[in-house]
Image (spheres, grey):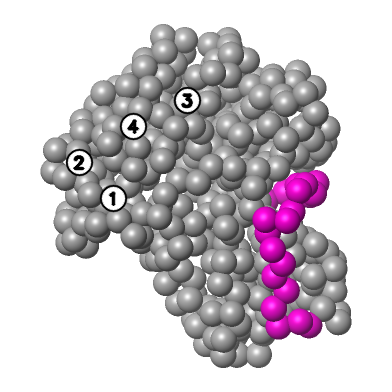
Amino acid sequence: MNGEPRILTFGCRLNAFESEVMRDHARAAGLKDVVIVNTCAVTAEAERQARQAIRRARRENPDAPIIVTGCAAQIDPAAYAAMPEVSRVLGNEEKLRAESFLPGANAAIAVDDIMTVRETAPHLVEGFEGRARAFVQIQQGCDHRCTFCIIPFGRGNNRSAPLGTIVDQTRRLVEAGYREVVLTGVDITGYGADLPGQPSLGQMARRLLAQVPDLPRLRLTSVDCVEVADDEDLMRLIAEEERLMPHLHLSLQAGDDMILKRMKRRHSRNDAIEFCRRAQRLRPGIAFGADLIAGFPTESDEMFQRSLDLIEECDLAWLHVFPYSAREGTPAARMPQVAKAVRKERAAQLRAAGDQAAQRFLDAQTGREATVLVERDDSGYSEHFAPVQLTAPTPEGSLVKARIERREGMKLIAEAVRRAA
């Protein structure tokens, strides 16, 4: 190792943010040759990959302490503590405390009951290694109980960060040179329900943009279409605020009403379609991404076809597809299961349809001008979250106007025209 904490991050953007918090804590505590594995529990495959990474980290760093944390460690700390490669296990709340990394903090397992946590502590991060975009945590946990999801048991109930903390974090990142901030959390459309006055996500975003006028780009992570549709402040921002990126990633999961009901989702198929049409009217050209689960228990061929059809009906451009993974302790795990081979085949069909939709979206950008945030190797992302490769060397972290020349595979090729304002 190089004398720096090594962080292996799995899963969501919130984990990416929290990995930077832990990096700062480990540095401040003088932990140089340490490996921290920040796990995910969203699927059994995510846990398998984490265990594999732990074993590989031990082979590559035979003398380094290995600390395991994240959702998988929170839910089943004993299983990770039993791995011979693991030195310590920290819970999702404990991993964010500076004292957890100080000399003398040697308990093999430090994991408390996440359901007893009532607040989200502020954590100011100076920057993000290897990224031009920065993440700002606005909330933790989730008050909903979808039948397939184990994450509330790893993250606890919804708790929101105060606006002042979010503004301070964002302002500091902008002063450090970041041109785009991504608001992240477990259920960001649940933001504010636990705060005085119950401010909505839209109210918070509007105030944030007003108080940090030098922030060029604000992006949202995964949102619930029903909760967003009822947030008139956010809908006005979509319509009127150019600094709010025209790209929404929707937590849809399925396109069949019966499956949505069995998932205990809060929206119907028609809710999703109507929301996308409304957003398109307010912000022509807006891009949608979505999470979709293939092969949820009891899903028939006809039910699956409705999920497949939803890609076109909602004009989805970017898909995250997951074959259903039974999580012990969830209601869906006790429902009649779809054969694994069928789940795998349906996931492949969704991904293929998603690739075709993405290609159509990218083809439609040809000849247009895009604003590209350059991340590395002269490539970055447009305001619609389309991957763009620039034809000439361009400094990392810069925001440039670029003319789209063509699509190559799943990436746009563009010529930088000028620096963006």
Which dot, 4 or 2, sits closer to the camera? 2
Front residue of 63 and 201: 201
Work out which quarter of the rendered image holds the C terminus and state it.
top right
Which dot, 4 or 1, sits closer to the camera? 1
Q: Which residues are magenta?
A: 106-129
Distance from the alpha carbon under mark 3 to that under mark 1: 21 Å
Q: Residue at x 47, y 10 (%)?
A: 282
The three-letter code of the residue at mark 2 reads Phe
Q: Which residue is disc 2 drawn over? A: 304
Q: Which residue is disc 3 drawn over? A: 226
Disc 2 element: helix
N-terminal of the pair, mark 4 or mark 1, is 1
Residue 161 image point, x, y percent: 75, 39
Circle 1 Cα neighbour tier, 10 Å, few/some/many (<14 / 14–19 / ≥20): many
Whether label 4 touches label 3, CB < 8 Å? no
Work out which quarter of the rendered image holds the N terminus and state it.
bottom right
Q: Residue at x 80, y 72 (%)?
A: 101
Q: Residue at x 73, y 74 (%)?
A: 110
Left or right relative to 42: residue 245: right
Q: Main secondary structure of the magenta part?
A: loop
Front residue of 313 and 240: 313
